[in-house]
Image (cartoon, rainbow, N blue to C red):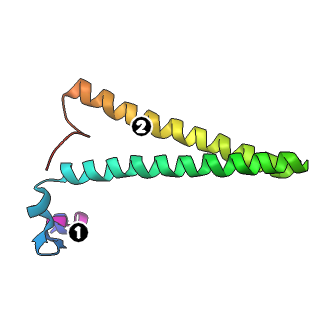
Amino acid sequence: MINRLLAANIGDINLGTNKLKDTYGSAAPLINIIVKNSLVIAGIIFLALLVFGGIMFIASAGNGDQKQAGKGKSAVTSAIIGFAIVFGAYLIIQIIQVITGLEILNSSL
């Protein structure tokens, strides 16, 4: 009874004609897909923020608007910090893979 209250059985979720447990077998491949796609999305967001902040910084510097230049610089700085955090997380995952021998980002369906 407690198990039903605390955990949901995601294996019975339908994916078209198949159930989730039939498609993935365990949670590892599903988590693998989520982590890989999250890294790609984070990279795209980093690139967009970097370009946006750079354009804002350059455009405002020509006008002499220090407030807008500060916003552009802040966007670029935030993008770089965010990229460092995501890269650090990826590096930690790689270190865990080497130490434990588990294949977190390389597992197949």
Q: Residue at x 22, y 63 (%)?
A: 7
Q: Say which amino acid is labelled 1.
A: Leu
Residue in the picture at 20% in, 36% down:
103
Residue 43: x %, y % from top left? 47, 46
Of the two numbered discs 2 and 1 on the same chain, state the one appearing first in sequence.
1
Residue at 49%, 50% in the rendered image: 44
Query: Which segment did they paint magenta?
Result: 5-11
Image location of residue 83, percent across then percent down = 52, 40
Question: How many numbered dots are placed on residues in this image?
Answer: 2
Q: Position of residue 63 (x, y in %)?
A: 89, 51
Give the Cα distance between marks 2 and 1: 32 Å
Residue lying furthest right: 64
Give the residue at mark 2.
89
Left/right of residue 99 with respect to residue 61 in the rendered view: left
> How far from the left and from the top, in percent, is residue 93?
33, 34
* Frontmost residue, 66 versus 85: 66
Q: Up-down: is 90 above or below 54? A: above
Q: Identify residue for label 1.
A: 5
Which amino acid lies under the numbered mark 2 shown in the image of this protein? Ala
Q: Which is more foreground, mark 2 or mark 1?
A: 2
Mark 1 surroundings within 10 Å by alpha-carbon count, few (fewer than 14), some (14 through 19), many (20 or more): few
Instruction: State left or right for residue 95 relative to residue 75.
Output: left
Can residue 92 be seen in the rendering of this structure? yes
- In the displayed structure, 80 sits above or below 31; it is above
Horizontally, is 94 left or right of 22 in the view? right
